[in-house]
Structure formats: C-alpha cells, structure tokens
Amino acid sequence: MHHDSPDPMMAASFQRTPSRDDSDNATDHSVEDSGHEGAAEGGSSAVVQSLQDVEEDPPTPSHDGSEEAGDMEDALYEKLKDAIMEAGSLRHEAYEETRRRQKADRDLADVSMMARDAESSYHGEARRRKEMEESLARERAAVEQDRRELDAILEKIREVDNRSAELELQISDSGRVMGELDVRMSESCSVLDALRREHRGEEPAADEESMPAVDGGDQSVSFLQLGLLELEEATDRFNESTMIGGASAGSRGRVYRGSLRGMSVAVKMICPDVAVHEARFGRAVDAIARARHPNIVALVGACPEARAVVHELVPGGSLEDRLGGEAPPLPWHARCGIAYRTCSALAYLHSTATVHGDVRPTNILLEDEQCSSSKLAGLGMPGFVAPPQLPSGVALAYVEPRYLATGELTPQCDVHALGVVLLCLVTGMPAFAAKKAAQKANDGSTPWHEVVDATAGGWPMERATEVALLGLKCCDAVETGGPHRPAELLDEALSVLEAATDATPGRTWSSLSASTASDSGGAPSYFLCPILKEVMRDPQIAGDGFTYEAEAMKEWLGSGHDTSPMTNLKLPTDELMPNHALRAAIQEWRHTRPSTFQRYQ
C-alpha cells in the first residue's frame, strides 16, 4: 500500500524530529539546571504520548501508494518505536538525576548544618580557652606574688639566723673571755697565796676537793666555751655515722668525729644516764685544759649544757683497736714507743699533782697506722661523774684494788693501770689473760717465748721479758703496798723502755721523746723546751697554753712571730706566765735524779 504524497509522513517525521530534540534539550537542561526539571520531564512525556497515539492509530496506507511508500511507513514506525524507547530511557535517567540532585541537596544541607555546629563549637571552645587562659594568668600572678612573699620571708629568716649566730659567737667569746679572766684572777690569787706561804715558810696544802686531781700549777687555762648548737653543726646533729667510740655496753660516753671552726675534733658526750656534778665537771675541765703535753690529747673546748668536752682529733684509732680484731699487727718497737710516750705523759701529770684515773688501751690513741706518735686521752673522765662510778667489764681489769675499796684516785691507780697496759703490749692478750699469763711465766710455769706476742715481729726475748717484769712490778707494787713510789716506778719504766727501744737498729729513745739534746740526761720530755729541745730553767706559759723556756719564747716573739710554735695558730696574747709547778719539778729532778737506774729482775 502506497501513498500518493509523502507529505503526511514527512510531517510526521518533521513532527518527531523536533520532539526528540526537545527531549534531548530538556534532559541536558535538567542536568544543567535543576530548576527546570519539571519542564524537561513534561516535554518528554508529550513526546512519548504523541508516539503512543501514532502507534495506536497508525496512518491508513494509501491504496494508490506504491510499494516504496509502504517501506517508508515501516521505517517510520521503527523510528517511532526507537524514539519511544529512547524517551523512556531519558525519562529514567532524568528521574535518577533528580534523585541524585535531591540527595546532594540533603547532603549539602547536612554538611552546612555540621559546619554551623562546628563553627558554634569552635567559638564556644575559643571562649572557654580564653577564660581558662585568663584564669591561669590570674593564678600565675597569685603564685608569683606568693613566691616573692616567701622569698622575702626566707631572706628575713636568713638574716635572723646570721644575726643569731653572730650573737651566739659573741656570747661564746664573751663567756670565754670572762672564763679566762676568772682563771687569771684565780691564778693570781693562787700565786699570791703561794708567795705568802713561801714567805712564811709554809707548804701549800693539797686541795681535797679537786677531782680527778689537784691542779698543782699556775698554767693558764685557755679553751673554747661552746654551745650545743655549735656542737650539733660540728657533728651533723650527732649523726650515728660520725660516732667513733663509746658504742660498747657500759661506756659512760660517746665520741663523735666533727669539724669545728676549721679544726678536726673529737666530741665526747657523757651518756644521759650518768649523773654529772656541775662543779666537779668544771674543775675536771680546768684540769684537762691545764694538761699541755705532746703525748696528751689537747682540749679544744667544753659545753656544760651538753655535758661534752671537745678534744683534738687523733685519727689513727686506739691501741685497743690495733691489739685486737683484724687490724695489722703492731711491731714490737712501736709498742715500746707507745709505752714510753704513755709513761712520759703520766710522769708529767703526776708532776703537776694530776691523776689521770682511766689509763687503758681504749684511751691511748695513735696518730697513724705506723704509730709514729701516740697520745693519752680520757683525762678527767672519772672527775665528771658524781658520785664516782666504778668501771665495769674489761675496764675493771685496769682498776687498782684499793680504789675499789676507797673510791679515792691516787697516782698508784695510774701506775697499776700502766702495768696492765705493758702486759697487754707484751702478750697481745686481754687484760686479765695477759696478767695471768705473765704471772705464770714469772713463776716458771710457762716459758716466756710462749707468752710474748709472736705477731710483734722478732721482739728480743730479753727486752720483752724485761718489759713484762716491769708491768708485773707496777701491778704488784701497788697491790702489795710495796716501798716504791709512783714517781720512782715511772722513772724506772722510762729507763727500761728506753733500753728496749735502743735495741732496735736505727732507733733511739730520743725518736720517741721530744728531746734530742745530749745534755738532757734522760729528762722527761715535758721538762724540755719545745723550741730549744733542752731542759728548761725558767719555764714560762705562753698564750697557747704550752710551756717554753722564757728566753727562747721571748726571742720567738721578738722576731715578729705572733703564732704558736706548737700549733701555728695565732696567739691570743704575748704575755708569759711563770710555771712554778714545772719549775719545782725540774729542780727536784735535777737534785734527786739517780746516776743509774735500777731494773726489776
């Protein structure tokens, strides 16, 4: 079936073509602008509707048309179908695009809301941060103000402490000066009384009240009056790590190592459970201060408040430490030197009418490990307590028997204790065992070579036996009330120990004493001038408390020296005072010294 004219189909084709273009344009416009989505969707619907109408009511083929017209109609029909399908596809795509745009709009709205919330949170956080910074600044300002106030308070406290220390030092110095003035006044009165008695031909009577011994000389007393605070600072508040003695049971005092005014010192404090008589304490301290001898520990100061005395520090430990424990063995020549120096110290004390009262290895201190020197400590300790307390334990072995009955300290007490010390040095045994072993050897029950300490290193048996017999004699003469006086026993001891030391090659007794003068004649070392090394004729006490030959000390001061020849410290005064007691002892020694010394066999 053919149509005569292609006009209707051409019209239809013409009608279709713009409709499709319109659909495409509507779709593109929908993508470009979401505001025209409805128009695009409407155009697509119109095209679809038109095509559907054509499909439902296709044009009637012309009876006069040719076969070609039929083919064109079929082709047109197929194109219409394709257009319908394409329009449906475009419609679906437009729908999907619309959904995507709507979802994008919702997401954009959500993001915008989140941005607004975040901005609001940011502003809130910034506001809170600013408030916190302002609060922190206020707190810092308050803390800084408190710190400045605290620094001001601490500065005031330091100023008060410094001022307090200055005042305490001034008080201490004032007390020391007053004490020195009192002592000088007392000494002046004593000298005046002595001159009066000498003028009347009277002998001065011993002072029965003085303990542990009588002050028989006019030596000046010079020591520091210390406060408890200063002792605490010197010993780190009496720290246990600074304690160097007195920890054993039964000890009446503890000894601490310390540093006082640039000096190394030993601070001895009497235990709290030991009763102390204040007056006796003062007299005992005075007696210690007057004892100036190279082999006696020098007194530095005292603190009645703390019941403490301060001595120079002797760093080598005690003889008891060296004789026992794990200490290196003590050579025999060193033992003789220690014994000689101890005898010399006791002879000096007895010449000034002073009794030590506590001679034992614990109180014999060594300068160093080689025992190049030794010093006697513990002077005055029995005089501190009231009433006098008897020692206990090992110390009881050194006590003279009559003292246990009478409680009276005499020179015999020192001689007895010295004898026990000599036996300990020879045997290396404790006190009781040493005395018992020496007695057996003296009786012939035990050979001497089994008694003498083998660790002493080749001690000549003759000399060792001689020293042991001397120790027994010191003990027996006191216990049996023999005819020998303490002074005679000490002189004999010095002679025996001198001979024992001379047996050492390269050693002489002069290396153990302060004398090297050929004309000293075996004089005790305390009779010798520290400058001239000769026996003094006019002993004078200098400001350092040591006694010198008057002419030598005047020459020393006249040459421009203002320091002590012994301590190298500045002298508090350049005045000299006569040492009448020492002068009398030297004169007696010159007139009564024997030409030879008898030894105990």
Image (spheres, rainbow, N blue to C red):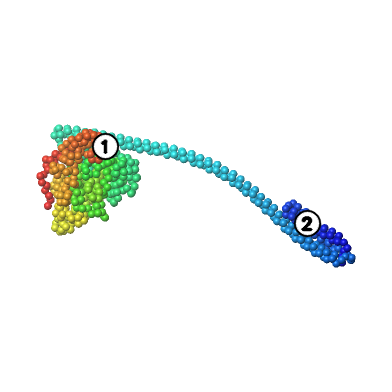
- The amino acid type of the residue labelled 2 equals Asp
Does dot 1 land on a helix, a strand or a loop? loop
Q: Which residue is mark 2?
A: 21
Q: Residue at x 83, y 66 (%)?
A: 71
- The amino acid type of the residue labelled 1 equals Lys
Does dot 2 land on a helix, a strand or a loop? helix
438 or 37, which is in the foreground? 37
Among the 4 quarters of the image, the one containing residue 173 = top left
Determine the CA span between mark 1 and mark 2: 128 Å
Percent x, y for residue 46?
Answer: 81, 57
Tell me: residue 514, above or below residue 40.
above
Give the side of residue 20 with respect to residue 464, left or right.
Answer: right
51 or 267, which is in the foreground? 51
Q: Which residue is mark 1?
A: 570
Q: Residue at x 30, y 50 (%)?
A: 247
Among the 4 quarters of the image, the one containing residue 553 = top left
Percent x, y for residue 14?
Answer: 82, 58
Q: Residue at x 26, y 37 (%)?
A: 570
Q: Residue at x 79, y 62 (%)?
A: 79
Percent x, y for residue 218?
Answer: 20, 37
Percent x, y for residue 70?
Answer: 84, 66
